[in-house]
Image: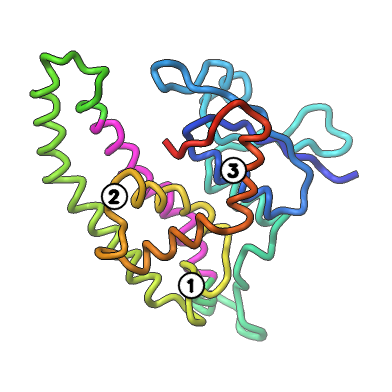
Amino acid sequence: MSPKVTLYWLDKSRAQRFIWLLEECNVDYNIEIFKRTPEMLAPPELKKVHPLGKSPVIGIHAPGKTEPTILAESGFITEYLTEHFAPHLAPKRYEEGKEGPGLETEEWLRYRFFMHYAEGSLMALMVTNLIFSMLKGDKIPFFLRPVTGAIAGRVDAAYFKPNFKTHFDFLEQQLATAPNGGGFLCGKDLTAADILMSFPMQAGQKRLKMINATAYPKLNEYVNKLDSMPGYKRSIERIEKESDITYELF
């Protein structure tokens, strides 16, 4: 018997990437759906799955085991699923006959870098930015909104925009220099790192409005390409079919 995978999916979260990743894997999987609270927090029921109470989380149901193996953290989940079910989404580490420290292919080095960069550098900035943006939202009492909005605006101008520019400039250059003609971050082929990077890239285009054809033509084309990938489209179709939720990025 082959193992089965359960994805514990939370709406308006980074978990959607893992439906796409599972669509690219040769594995049977199902989705357990969780909805955010009115405060836009993960529901307490998720803590029954994993003590941190966050999504994404996956369960691996191995033959002969009564309880699933539960895995958390996006980078770890991505590497685990790719290693076991989708090795075609990881670049070749070494050229034939050239193995050892410092001899890795550029494609593989980029792959491992972006596997950590997506959550460790870029998403950390995006989550902080999202929290600050709430200072302008309707949950702030209207008489305080001018003050909190002004504070958020100053932090945005002094900190967030310059840092996002640094990241997006870097990523534009990475696409311009991707090996073997490029097209994706690690080269000419889609990798699991591209799938992991899809959420912050979509956020940069659709929420921040910083990634566009004028400012970042290669990044903008890249995000549009990810949005049009068959696996990504299937992920949207599946979650909308299995839930009463019209999928939204945020």
Q: Which residue is mark 1?
A: 183
Question: Is residue 11 positioned above or below 142 on the image?
Answer: below
- Element marked by disc 1: loop
Q: Quadrant of residue 140?
A: top left
- Element marked by disc 2: loop
Question: Is residue 50 positioned above or below 231 on the image?
Answer: above
Disc 2 crowd, CA 10 A, few/some/many (<14, 14-19, 20+): few
Q: Position of residue 183 (x, y in %)?
A: 48, 72
Residue that appears at 53% across and 22% down: 35
Q: Which residue is mark 2?
A: 209
Instruction: Tell me the amino acid under the disc marked 3.
Output: Ile
> Mark 2 and 1 residues: CB-CB less than 8 Å, in contact?
no
Residue that appears at 49% across and 62% down: 225
Q: Position of residue 137 (x, y in %)?
A: 24, 25
Cα gap from disc 2 to disc 1, whole angstroms: 22 Å
Disc 1 crowd, CA 10 A, few/some/many (<14, 14-19, 20+): some
Q: Kindly identify which numbered label has been placed on residue 201.
A: none
Instruction: Tell me the amino acid under the disc marked 1.
Output: Gly
Q: What secondary structure is the stretch in magenta mostly built from?
A: helix
Residue that appears at 38% across and 45% down: 123
Q: Which residue is mark 3?
A: 236
Cα gap from disc 3 to disc 2, whole angstroms: 22 Å
Disc 3 crowd, CA 10 A, few/some/many (<14, 14-19, 20+): some
